Image (tube, helix red, strand yellow):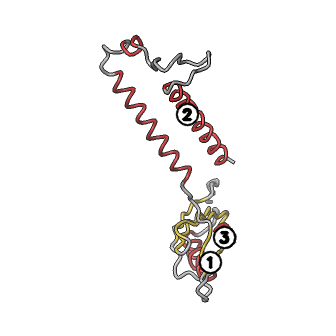
């Protein structure tokens, strides 16, 4: 939901900026603006002489304005590329031996990996994300361990069972993975 809201807000902001820039361009090209518009004619300027001369004696003003605007443009471009970048692998190419191959949904493989990793002893929750290319996927596994879990056993079970089963089932030669272990928050135990 947050991703949808984020993209809608980004689209609305872009639409407002395009409309404002287009209307200023249209007035500059000679289109007659409405009476309520901020520019009266094509010879009207964005900043009057008085507005531009107000800060002329302060040498820091214009470099600061230009620097802030440049930073805003770079931030907006970074945000746009972050929105358009696909973080998850949509499908995995499974070798069937006939030269054609089959496509396995990435979310389905993530779900199976999560279920199998969460079933291991001491694992409270598991989260899996597939990245990379469809013929060379990579897994990022996050495990939340219980208070009585042995991290080495959980890591070994994840690598030797869950990831190995996924690799063999999809017919992949290798499935590199990064496993992040976190402990669930719990109260300290008393030793008597």
- Few, some or many residues within 10 Å of mark 3 (<14, 14–19, 20+): some
Mark 3 or 2, nearer chain start: 2
| Front residue of 182 and 9 | 9
**Quarter occupied by the C terminus:** bottom right
* Residue behind mark 2: 17
157 to the left or right of 81 = right
| Front residue of 183 and 70 | 70
Q: How far is mark 3 from mark 2, CA to CA?
A: 38 Å
Q: How far is mark 1 from mark 2, CA to CA?
A: 47 Å
Residue 19 position (above or below residue 107): above
From the image, state whether disc 3 or disc 1 is nearer to you. Answer: 3
| Front residue of 97 and 145 | 97
Residue 65 position (above or below residue 83): above
* Residue behind mark 3: 105
Mark 3 or 1, nearer chain start: 3
Q: Position of residue 79 (x, y in %)?
A: 51, 45
Q: Position of residue 34 (x, y in %)?
A: 62, 19
Mark 1 or 2, nearer chain start: 2
Residue at image point 57% right, 21% down? 32
The numbered dot on residue 130 is none
180 to the left or right of 45 = right
- Few, some or many residues within 10 Å of mark 2 (<14, 14–19, 20+): few
* Residue behind mark 1: 166
**Secondary structure category for the residue under label 2:** helix
From the image, state whether disc 1 or disc 2 is nearer to you. Answer: 2
Residue at image point 67% right, 73% down? 116
């Amino acid at each position: 939901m947050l991703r949808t809201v984020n993209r809608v807000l980004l689209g609305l902001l872009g639409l407002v900026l395009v409309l404002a820039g287009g209307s200023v361009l249209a007035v500059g090209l000679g289109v007659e603006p409405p009476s309520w518009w901020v520019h009266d004619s094509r010879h009207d300027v964005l900043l009057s002489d008085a507005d531009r001369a107000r800060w002329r004696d302060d040498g820091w003003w214009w470099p600061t304005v230009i620097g802030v605007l440049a930073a805003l443009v770079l931030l907006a471009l970074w945000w746009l590329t972050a929105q358009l970048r696909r973080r998850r692998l949509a499908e995995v190419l499974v070798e069937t031996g006939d030269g054609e191959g089959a496509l396995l949904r990435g979310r389905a493989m993530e779900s199976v990996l999560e279920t199998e990793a969460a079933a291991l002893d001491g694992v409270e929750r598991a989260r899996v994300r597939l990245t990379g290319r469809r013929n060379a996927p990579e897994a990022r596994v996050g495990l939340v361990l219980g208070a009585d879990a042995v991290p080495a056993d959980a890591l070994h079970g994840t690598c030797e069972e869950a990831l190995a089963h996924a690799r063999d089932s999809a017919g992949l030669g290798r499935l590199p993975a990064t496993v992040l272990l976190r402990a669930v928050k719990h109260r300290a135990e008393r030793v008597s």
